[in-house]
Image (cartoon, grey):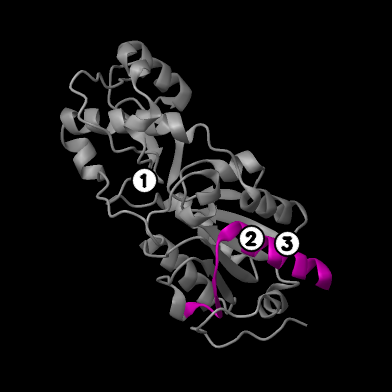
Amino acid sequence: MHAPSPAPGTTGTPDLNTVADLLHGRRLAVLTGAGVSTDSGIPDYRGPGAPVRTPMTGQQFLASAESRRRYWAGSHLGWRLMGRARPNAAHALLAEWEARGRVHGAITQNVDGLHRQAGTRKLVELHGSLDRVYCLDCGQGFAREAIAEQINAANPWLGELGDHEADRLNPDGDAEVPELARFLAPACTLCGGILKPDVVFFGETVPVARFARARDIVAGAEALLVVGSSLTVNSGIRLLEQARRDDSPIVIINRGRTGGHTRAALNVEGSAAPTLAALDALLRERD
């Protein structure tokens, strides 16, 4: 028999034994945000101490070649840093939970590809992934490494820039860099068209079919565990509402208050990797 769900909006940090009692024996849908990747060296958007930033929107990207040139300059240097990132203990544990049947499926708001690298199989990358690029004109897809090689070949002087030129890496893989007047943006090698990373920019919507897959994961689970997301993006809140309508308890682990605080049965203040490790130990005791 499952433990009863506490009333939504529980305040304070509950004892993890309470969380373990609630989640044990339930198939979990997991929703992750930028906080799950901070231990991999990728910063958070809205966590404590995160700088205020105004990322490029999809509308701005499409509006002019100059905007696209600025985006690709910063994104290329950011990719150079993000490409070194590796899954951390939180990614590894969630993949292990899936293999053991504890996790029914995972949904991530991150575009870093680290859940895939860690081995999670039933995964919806809600906002896409930076390691894929496609042409807006002909639809041809490319690996990000191939585009990086094209950029390096067209801009050999980029090799002279140290990582300090892109030391403000953002969770979407962009980096704040000085204006690069000499930068030549990449183009589709088949038709010469506009290239765009396969990610949902700010101001764009998640593709309908992709969101439906995420919703199906939540609907097929018996509880929703949110890790490292501030839940300020509408798509995340919609998934919480799906769980609430299904009477599935919601547990949120995050540093700082979230937009889903009042919907959750339990809100846990904490960083992703150590909190999940402690929770895993308690769940194993109950198995």
> What mark, if any, has residue 274 been given in the picture?
2
Between 19 and 202, the one nearer to me in the picture:
19
Kindly identify the residue that appears in the image at 69 percent across and 73 percent down: 23
Between 140 and 50, the one nearer to me in the picture:
50
Q: The C terminus appears in which quarter of the rendering?
A: bottom right
Kindly identify the residue that appears in the image at 44 percent across and 73 percent down: 260
Q: Splitting the image into 4 quarters, where does residue 149 fall?
A: top left
Q: Is residue 149 magenta?
A: no
Three-letter amino acid code at the position of disc 1: Val
Kindly identify the residue that appears in the image at 21 percent across and 36 percent down: 62
Between 167 and 105, the one nearer to me in the picture:
167
Judged by depth in the image, the label closer to the viewer, 3 or 2, is: 2
Q: Is residue 150 left or right of residue 121?
A: left
How would you rate the neighbour count of disc 1 (Cα within 10 Å): few for under 14, some for 14-19, many for 20 or more? Answer: many
Q: Is residue 27 left or right of residue 36?
A: right
Label 3: element kind: loop
> What mark, if any, has residue 102 been given in the picture?
3
The correct choice, above or below, for 128 with respect to 191 in the image is: below
Where residue 70 appears, as percent x and y from the top left, is 23, 31
The correct choice, above or below, for 102 with respect to 2 in the image is: above
Label 2: element kind: helix
Compare marks 1 and 2 and give the one earlier in the sequence.
1
Judged by depth in the image, the label closer to the viewer, 1 or 2, is: 2
Where residue 281 appears, as percent x and y from the top left, is 76, 65
Compare marks 3 and 2 and give the one earlier in the sequence.
3
Kindly identify the residue that appears in the image at 61 percent across and 46 percent down: 88
> What mark, if any, has residue 200 been given in the picture?
1
Read off the magenta span: 263-287
The correct choice, above or below, for 274 with respect to 163 in the image is: below
